[in-house]
Amino acid sequence: MKGHVYSCENLVVGNTLESAILAYVSGATYIQNTPAAPFVFECFDAEDELGFLNIENTPATLVVGDVLREVGVSKLKVWEKLIHRMALLGKIPFSNQTIRLRVRGTAVRVILKETRAFDFEFKNLILCDDEGVSGLPPPQYRRNTKYTIYDWFNVHQGCTHKYDALETDDKLVSRVDFYPSVRIDGNDGTLKDMVATSYADRKEQLFNIEYSDLYSRLKAIELLKTSQIFGEKGTPPKIELNRRDVVHHTDVKYEFEEDNISFVSYKLVDMLRGKFDW
């Protein structure tokens, strides 16, 4: 396995919007251990100031149930802009590729497709995530905090209405977001499919019938009916599961003997207030 050695002042390893912001603001080399783009319907608050990222937070108005709600720019669009800018600057050596990493002294070895290896020598290493990263000491703790479930539905009847989203007070189908269907040729945006977002506190809940896509589908149908969304001739809306995505959220903490290696876990709200350093 032929090796390639690169040197960088600061190296950030992570897969979240927060880690991308950290790498961009600090001018660090950024390695995405497991690229994970923000959920397409997550937005900044309309009042969030993004000037430190040189991004304008252009507000938009959504119809959420019976309320008009102003939201900021899509987190996905911000993430894409930062990734694009850093790529142009040569700060992202790998993008959307399956890699493994190993911390070795003052270098991180990146193994690409099991056939090529690249060594990145660093002065400072900032880890924001440990997935796929070996060579680390045992964590001080690791605990699962929650699971986010996305059920994507094709809407066959009940796909024409005014709403951008609907919300509930429950963890199962906490929110439904609507988007123009790409399944229908010539759709002008008026025919909408949907995704239902749910939350689970424990892993075992994912295997309970109450959290199955069947229950999610039934509850989503009731939510549509409550919002006066029906199928043809007033029949119940007809939706079909396209796929289910589950996002695992973990809280982990490391302590390193080396002064130039750190594990950080920033919250976006703190970063927007300038409360981050390393």
Image (cartoon, rainbow, N blue to C red):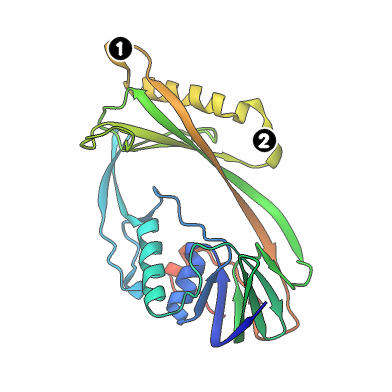
What is the number of callouts on the image? 2
- Depth check: give the residue in front, 185 or 197: 185
The disc label shown at residue 85, or none: none
Crowdedness of circle 2 by 10 Å Cα count: few (<14), some, many (20+)? some
- Disc 2 is placed on an element classified as helix
Residue tagged by mark 2? 205
Residue 110, position as x, y percentages in the image: 62, 74
Q: Which residue lies furthest to the right in this view?
A: 138
Which quarter of the image is occupied by the C terminus? bottom right
Left or right of residue 243, residue 163 in this image: left
Residue at the image position 27 percent from the left and 31 percent from the top: 191
Residue 25, position as x, y percentages in the image: 43, 78
Residue tagged by mark 1? 234
Q: Three-letter amino acid code at disc 1? A: Gly
Left or right of residue 261, residue 53 in this image: left
Note whether 2 is above or below 14 in the view shown: below
Residue at the image position 55 percent from the left and 24 percent from the top: 214
Residue 18, position as x, y percentages in the image: 49, 66
Q: Which of marks 1 and 2 is nearer the N terminus?
A: 2
Residue at the image position 27 percent from the left and 10 percent from the top: 233
Left or right of residue 232, residue 194 in this image: right
Q: Three-letter amino acid code at disc 2? A: Gln
- Depth check: give the residue in front, 185 or 249: 185
Note whether 249 is above or below 183 in the view shown: below
Q: How far apart are marks 1 and 2 (CA)?
A: 34 Å
Residue at the image position 45 percent from the left and 55 percent from the top: 38
Residue 29, position as x, y percentages in the image: 50, 79
